[in-house]
Amino acid sequence: MLRTTSGKPVEVIDPGLPNSNAGPDFFNAKLKIDGMLWVGNVEIHTKTSDWYRHGHDKDAAYDNVILHVAEVIDVDVCRTNGEMIPQMELSCPETIRRHYDELHRMDFSPPCYSILPSLSKLMIHSWLSALQMERLEQKRALIARRLDKCANNWEDVFFITLARNFGFGLNGDAFELWASSLQLRAVDKHRDNLLQVEAFFFGQAGLLQGEDSLYDLYYQNLKKEYEYLRCKFELPLPMNKAVWRFLRLRPDSFPHIRLAQLAYLYNVRESLFSQVMDAESLLEVRKLLAGTTSSYWETHFTFSRESPRREKKIGEKALNLIVINTVIPFLYTYGLHKANDFLCERATRFLEELKAEDNYVIRQWSGAGISVHTAADSQALLQLQKEYCDKKDCLRCRFGYEYLKQK
């Protein structure tokens, strides 16, 4: 049983919320000390004398501390009014300290690979399920922030999120900046004309600046249309084309091709967000998002430079990533907004139906003994890598916990 330095029993009912900002380490903890319920904050130090070294005895923000925990008790501590605070000595076993140091020094990823084969399937499944929901919640929060900026226009935010994910990581920020700068109500007035939609898209992306394609008739027509539309709708200045990245990109992923595919989708799919929300199967969603380009791009990857003729359809792998990163988060977010459990369930069902993503992170975890079959598995592992492994936050990871408690 836990006890204070004066011998009173301590029962932890709720450890409270960890605080990463200024103030006590844990907020709103619930403890029973000698049978009496206390609700307040908890502060943790290596030595109790750190209380004075950090100036907490003169800081009213620490007056609500109900328990001070330290590995070494070398002095009594008090609040700003001189009232003594209960203390508890809690040392870290040497084996846990050694294992924690091993996790932080390990240059192999994942650092806890040695214990993964011994973990039960139930334990792994429960942790991956929690990580999957944690990742969905993060994406929901991102959508909520975009909704605040767009006056709760779901169609606009869906387009911005879709555009960002057409950047597939490398150009994601540039695509989001571009989509946010578009006046979509103006584009709506010309969406039945693919050339004019392309003029809006390429013009605002800054890709119609300069005279580098002087003898390309398609380029000149786009530029002429864009100048007309820019004057008609008083469009903001286009982006600087230097923001677009091409290095280490396959030609099929060049910004020009992705913009042309988006223009085609916008031209042929009216109320795309509503249609996607109504689609009940992955097959329906794929049909809605399956796009190509205008004929010019069948023989080009950029302006003026011709290439062998080939239809530039959105590939299956790219389509799956768009479903994972755009459609599923919107189904979940919109389902919560409408209190529609069917949409939320559809989001998780789609994750279970999609194949797992194939990238370096997923291959590492698979090689370490974690079974990865569906997109739900791969999304959970990406969340684990990004929010726990990369940040060395092993103490909050269930795999890390299992590693620490081994003999």
Image: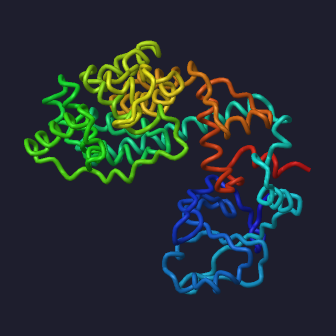
Which residue is at 27% across, 20% downward? 268
Q: Position of residue 361 (x, y in %)?
A: 67, 40
Q: Judge whether residue 299 can be spotted in this image.
A: yes
In the displayed structure, 236 sits above or below 220; it is below
Q: Image height check: is 193 above or below 177?
A: above
| Relative image position of residue 112 (x, y in whole percent) | 80, 47
Taking the image as shown, residue 188 lies to the left or right of residue 169, namely left
Q: How is the image coloured?
A: rainbow
User: Looking at the image, is 66 positioned above or below residue 260?
Assistant: below
User: Horizontal and vertical percent for residue 114?
Assistant: 86, 43
Kindly indicate the quadrant of the structure image that contains residue 303: top left
Please say if 276 is above or below 206: above
* Quarter occupied by residue 195: top left
Q: Residue at x 79, y 37 (%)?
A: 368
Q: In the figure, is residue 198 to the left or right of 103?
A: left
Q: Which of 190 and 71 is in front in this view?
A: 190
How many dots with numbers? 0
Q: Position of residue 317 (x, y in %)?
A: 54, 25
Viewer-side residue, 375 vs 235: 235
Q: Between residues 288 and 346, which one lies in front from this camera angle? A: 288
Q: Does residue 342 appear anywhere in the picture?
A: no
x 67%, y 24%: residue: 373
